[in-house]
Amino acid sequence: MVCCFGERKSRDTMQKKTKNVVKFGIIGFGRYAERRLVPAFLQAEKAELVAISKRNAAYARRKAHYNIPFSFSNPAELVLHPAVEAVLVCSPPFYHREHALLAARAGKHVMVEKPLAANADEVAEMIQTCQKNRVLFYPAFVMRFAPVIQEMRRIVQSGEIGPLKFVNAHFVLDASLSPRSWLNDPQISCGGPVADLGSHLFDLLMYLTGKPVVGVKRFLQPPYSREQIERNAIINLEFEGGILGSVFVSFDLPRESAIELYGRYGALKVQDFNEPNKTVKLLRTHAEGCARQDISNGYYYTAMLDHFAEVILEGKEPVNSAESGLQNQKILDIIYHSNTGGFETIN
């Protein structure tokens, strides 16, 4: 059923948008979409939120004050609506494949939240279906757009700290505080903190090093199974070119994040790199000492939406590629579905 809130939309909001705007629908309009994406759309110049889908239709209708023209209780109705040009899939991971294929077959561009799917075969099918229907597939790894990440990548590419030798990252939080109750259900979440948090870190480390991961070794506590998720994990990585890496994630600790990059001539270190609208401190160390740079992260969710709109409208080179998303899922597949438990290479 469709509920139209168009008449309530403010005149200023309506006048802000032009023809050079991509109109989005969100499938799975939950806490994340409301807390992070709605403010991002309000600030965006080239992306507009026009539709949401939520199984609880009454919940969707209560979001009328966001001036979203259309709400649906069925994702199939959302993707068929002519006002929707692109779909952002924010449903729990188990449903990502189903909802991405719905959108692609309806001729809508597709942006998918992480983890992208249950396995790499599903991601490959999503990409192929988008290609067949001549629409774009975009992995929503938003943290690439944080200004501190962009600055770290610039420094690495400049050669200032020399060739990278080791990279280290952690991302932890107390999942008992999350409203996403499905996080603890391996059938719905498709993994624990490795899928939810580690997928971000794998993506960022590949982006910052400029190298794909070629080998993985896992340590999961407790072991992941169809009945339980892991709660804590250390993942050792080898990148193309011999760079070594380590990632730690947890659902049992107070929220914190950090990235460290060690090069031949120096290192880069940042804490709480993923905090939007906050100033973060980037530390550079080298033989002569260290220097601190304060960087305002801004609301980088808006940057991701506007960038994807530019990719659609202008053919801009995407910061996130479908191939990088598939590579990320291959890492998760080894971690969750390998039977050896030893160091494994990625094909």
Image (cartoon, rainbow, N blue to C red):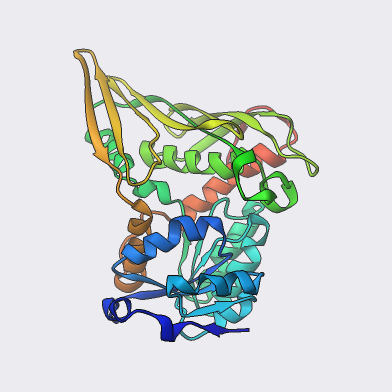
288 above or below 53?
above
Direction from residue 222 to residue 65 in the image, left or right: left
Residue at figure coordinates x 64%, y 59% from the top left: 122
Number of numbered discs visible in the structure rendering? 0
The quarter of the rendered structure image containing the N terminus is bottom right
Q: Residue 119 location, x and y as percent?
A: 65, 52
User: For this rendering, which residue is in front, 89 or 73?
Assistant: 73
Q: Nearer the viewer, residue 28 or 223?
A: 28
Percent of width and height locating residue 272? 40, 34
Residue 229 quadrant? top right
Q: Quadrant of residue 67?
A: bottom left
Q: Is residue 9 above or below residue 333?
A: below
Quadrant of the image containing the C terminus: top right
Above or below, 84 against 262 in this view is below
Q: Position of residue 247 (x, y in %)?
A: 52, 30
Q: Which residue, as the protein is rendered here, is positioned at the far right?
A: 227
Position of residue 46 in the picture relative to residue 51 (left or right): left
Residue 347 visible from this viewpoint: no
Kindly tell me whether residue 89 is visible in this rendering: yes
In the displayed orientation, state which residue is furthest to the left. Answer: 288
- The residue lying at 58 percent from left, 84 percent from top is 2
Give 314 or 59, whichever is nearer the viewer. 59
Residue at image point 44% right, 84% down: 6
Q: Nearer the viewer, residue 48 or 343?
A: 48
Write the residue at 28% across / 25% down: 283
Q: Position of residue 292 (x, y in %)?
A: 23, 26
In the image, taking residue 139 as reference, residue 150 lies left or right, namely: left
